[in-house]
Amino acid sequence: MLESAACMELKNFLKRLGHFDERRSATYVASLARALVYCHEKKVIHRDIKLENLLLDIEGQLKIVDFGWAVQSSAKRHTMCGTIDYLAPEMVEKREHDHNVDNWTLGILCYEFLYGVLPFEAEDQYDTFRRILKVDLKFPPSPRISDEAKDLINKLLVKDSSKRLSFQRILEHPWIVKNADHPSGDCNDKL
């Protein structure tokens, strides 16, 4: 607990900057993918990855916190849990879900890092759920966001959870390879 005292919420850092550039975004996505590989190898599904549950330490390293909705299981789960804007379609529909809900959330975060907004945010919960279920994904025009970044997001925000990119494939994706700092995953310039 003392370690978190020297950390900053990633949400506050993003709010301060408005959005992250592709290098920082790719570095954070790669860092999260590696951390979630470890969690999933231990059969832990976080189920509530969001900006508020990500901290930056003094060296610029990401830390995942708040495992309150996490489960340790290799079996499919049925509980709808997490934060509305980050929920995967299978959770919205109250269907069985597995570790792939964390892959979906990584797509949400990648979009949020790059654009500074959530991809399915709407006026109310009903419209947010509708947009999630339709995967009503829109990319605002921005010359600073590459087609490779959009490709990664599109491969994570897939309704069929079995077709979402695995964490290994995320780490091999051309956008990550081209932009992410390796292997430490830190990005502490301008902190």
Image: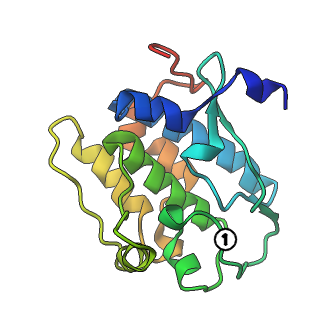
Q: Position of residue 122 (x, y in %)?
A: 34, 67
Residue situated in front as seen by the camera: 17 or 159: 17
* Above or below: residue 98 compared with residue 20: below
Q: Position of residue 104 (x, y in %)?
A: 51, 62
Residue drawn at x 35%, y 59% as measured from the top left: 119
Residue drawn at x 35%, y 73% as measured from the top left: 135
Residue situated in front as seen by the camera: 34 or 67: 67
Quadrant of the image occupied by residue 18: top left
* Above or below: residue 126 compared with residue 40: below
Tell whether 167 sits left or right of 132: right
* Above or below: residue 65 compared with residue 44: above
Q: Which residue is mark 1?
A: 81
Q: How is the image coloured?
A: rainbow
Q: Position of residue 107 (x, y in %)?
A: 45, 55
Residue type highlighted by circle 1: Cys
- Residue furthest to the top in view is 189
Residue drawn at x 85%, y 32% as measured from the top left: 1
Residue 183 visible (yes or no): yes
Residue 33 visible (yes or no): no
- Residue furthest to the front in view is 123
